[in-house]
Image (cartoon, rainbow, N blue to C red):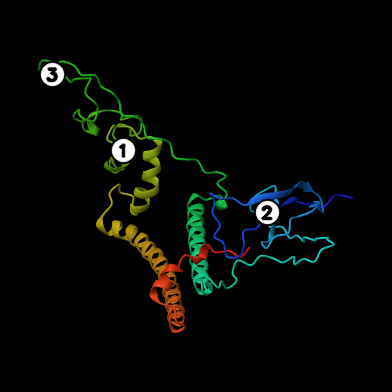
Amino acid sequence: QTEPAYPTVGFTVFQGRGNHMKLDNMKPLHKLKVANLKRGDGVCLELGTLESTEDKYVVIAYTDQPNVEHKYTITLYTDYDHVFERIDARLNCDQCGNPSGLYRVLDSLDRMERIAKRVLDKERRLQIGDGGTYTGYVPPAPPKPKPYFPPQDPLPPFDGANQMVPPAVRERLPMRSIGVVGGNVPHGASSELERKFLAADSDGDGYIDAAEATDYVQYHERADVDGDGMISMEEMIRFIRPLEEQLLSSRSRHEQALGGMNDEIRKQLERIAAVRRELMELGMGEEDLSAKDRSRFCSVM
């Protein structure tokens, strides 16, 4: 029989500090006992004799991997009278007043931030494709470095060209004056082919690389409905209008989602103001309220 997929579980016992004490990372809890990680259906720890104290002992269970949800039951066997209860960090605190309203606001804000982050991450995955698995995603190639041309002395004027000057600086010859340009347009080609070639050759070096060909097919060829190599104003409007409608639709969706979040924040702020008014009616002043705003760090132990 195959063993069930039990997680590796352990637990620790700490010394408590009292009720409503602010936890601080600079002052960790005092560890008393440790039950090492064990893979199975039970972890046991013999505590022995514990000193009598007014504070509580805290038992914290943990697994070998973070962010793993696991249901567990802790059973305590002892001959002494005791109270073994679950810690509730949301109990009303006599020192802090009633922070439950502020807790609900902070929890709602945290939940909205997590949802917004998930939406942005899903949009990014849909843009990449492959169902959001990043399987076939290939990062774009880095840009080509610019060619280096060392300085040289000026040449005397003559019928020719300075070959050390970059090709983009040299005067381009008309396409009909040469037989073949980069092997793409044959001699005697029609003006339609020449216009298409000029449209694809974006950097004007007389050659069409893979990136230029991809851009031409993706944008220019789709916009050039009649295929004459030129994009008229009517063709441009026809090509841009669906993109503008798509952008406006996406913007309206984002504005609607943002409006809903603003409404939720406004409602939560109104609830906070109502709680503050109730507290002031009970006799608490503004100074007392401002001093208790940091009660979210309070924990019952």
Q: Position of residue 35 (x, y in %)?
A: 76, 48
Q: Position of residue 168 (x, y in %)?
A: 23, 30
Which of these two is toward me, 50 or 292?
50
Q: CA distance from mark 2 to mark 1?
A: 72 Å
Local crowd at mark 3 within 10 Å, few (<14), some, or many (≥20)?
few
Q: Quadrant of the C terminus?
A: bottom right
Which of these two is toward me, 206 or 184?
206
Residue 291 lies in quadrant: bottom left
Determine whether label 3 and label 1 are within 8 Å by CB. Answer: no
Quick check: 21 left or right of 156?
right
Sequence-first tag of 3 and 1: 3
- Above/below status of 53 relative to 173: below
SS assignment at label 2: strand
Residue marked by disc 2? 14
SS assignment at label 3: loop
Inspect the image, locate mark 3, and give the three-letter code of the amino acid beneath it: Asp
Residue marked by disc 1? 201
Sequence-first tag of 2 and 1: 2
| Nearest to viewer (mark 3 / mark 2) | 2
Q: Residue at x 37, y 44 (%)?
A: 215
Residue marked by disc 3? 159
Q: List the single residue furthest toward the bottom.
A: 281
